[in-house]
Image: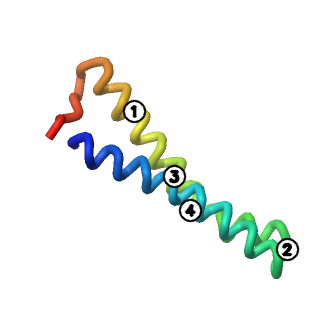
Amino acid sequence: MNRDRFVQLSFLAFGLILVSFVVMGTSRIFLPYDVARLLAAPTFFAAFGLVGYLFVRATLSFLGVVPIEET
């Protein structure tokens, strides 16, 4: 993985978090709170998994186990 791909995945994770909040907020207008949470949950968990992966990847790069290439 290179640095550009790492940054792109970071922006994707941030965007998924925003989409999760937008889905929950707009669906709460028409649907009950529990249903809105169920609709927003998949994007939130995808973002959480992506952030977890990026954290592990950055930690491994910091420790020198799996470097992130500069190109």
Q: Amino acid at mark 4?
A: Thr
Q: Which badge, 2 or 4, is on the more N-terminal residue?
A: 2
Image location of residue 41, percent across then percent down: 64, 61
Quadrant the N terminus occupies? top left
Gap in Å between the C-alphas at discs 1 and 3?
17 Å
Residue that lies at the very extreme toward the bottom in this rendered image: 30
Residue 61: quadrant of the picture: top left
30 displayed left or right of 47: right
Image location of residue 35, percent across then percent down: 77, 72
Q: Which badge, 2 or 1, is on the more N-terminal residue?
A: 2
Quadrant the C terminus occupies? top left
Q: Kindly indicate whether the residue at mark 4 contacts the one at mark 3 (C-beta within 8 angstroms).
A: no
> Within 10 angstroms of label 4, few (less than 14), some, or many (20 or more) residues?
some
Q: Amino acid at mark 3?
A: Phe
- Determine whether 52 is above or below 41 in the image: above
Is residue 42 or residue 14 the one in the foreground?
A: 14
Q: Kindly indicate whether the residue at mark 4 contacts the one at mark 1 (C-beta within 8 angstroms).
A: no
> Within 10 angstroms of label 2, few (less than 14), some, or many (20 or more) residues?
few
12 displayed left or right of 35: left
Gap in Å between the C-alphas at discs 2 and 3?
26 Å
- Residue drawn at 85 percent across, 73 percent down: 32
Q: Amino acid at mark 1?
A: Val
Gap in Å between the C-alphas at discs 2 and 4?
18 Å
Q: Circle 3 sits on which residue?
A: 14
Q: Amino acid at mark 2?
A: Pro
44 displayed left or right of 8: right
Image location of residue 52, percent across then percent down: 47, 40
Q: Circle 2 sits on which residue?
A: 32
- Residue drawn at 51 percent across, 58 percent down: 15
